[in-house]
Image (tube, helix red, strand yellow):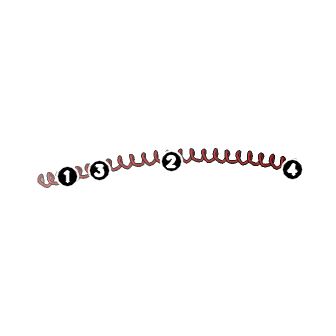
Amino acid sequence: MAVEAECLAEEKMAKNESLRNALQKEEFILTGLKAALTLEKEKKKEARLKVAELEAQLAKSNLEAVARAIKELKTSLKMKDLNIAFI
């Protein structure tokens, strides 16, 4: 009976050790996955900032193009008025 109890205790200890090792591996993997997730979140944040920056540049560029077009239109209208005045 004592031999059986000792054998069961050894089996339990071996199983506990195996489970402990598996848990350590899972914790290691989890740590790596958390680091990868953090990195992906940072990349996503940087991409959002870049998109916002590009959108701002596009809006500024559009405003500048509209301003140039208005200026050219005004100049064109002035030239047309001058041509009419000389005719």
The residue to which callout 4 is attached is: 84
For the point 32% across and 51% down, which residue is it?
26
Q: Dot 3 corresponds to which residue?
A: 25
* Residue corresponding to mark 2: 47
- Which numbered disc, 2 or 1, marks the residue closer to the eye? 2
Question: Tag 1: Cα neighbours inside 10 Å, few (<14), some, or many (≥20)?
Answer: few
The alpha-carbon separation of the residues under discs 3 and 4 comes to 87 Å
Toward the viewer: 81 or 4? 81
- Among numbered discs 2 and 1, the one appearing first in the sequence: 1
Q: Categorize mark 2 by other alpha carbons within 10 Å: few (<14), some (14-19), many (20+).
A: few
Q: Quadrant of the N terminus?
A: bottom left
Mark nearest the camera among 3 and 1 is: 3
Q: Which residue is mark 1?
A: 14
Q: CA distance from mark 1 to mark 4?
A: 103 Å
Q: Residue drawn at (86%, 50%), measured in percent from left and top?
A: 84
Q: Amino acid at mark 1?
A: Ala
- Mark nearer the viewer, 3 or 4: 4
Mark 3 nearby-residue class (10 Å; few <14, some 14–19, many ≥20): few
- Identify the amino acid type marked 4: Ile
Report how far apart the C-alphas of labels 3 and 1 lie in the structure. 17 Å
**Secondary structure at numbered mark 3:** helix
Labelled pair 3, 1 in contact (Cβ < 8 Å): no
The answer to which of marks 1 and 4 sits earlier in the sequence is: 1
Q: Earlier in the sequence, mark 2 or mark 4?
A: 2
Please identify, in this view, whether the residue under mark 2 or under mark 4 is nearer the observer.
Answer: 4
Q: Position of residue 51 (x, y in %)?
A: 55, 48
Inspect the image, locate mark 3, and give the three-letter code of the amino acid beneath it. Answer: Lys
Residues at marks 2 and 4, CA–CA distance in whole angstroms = 54 Å
Percent across and percent down for residue 64 are: 67, 45
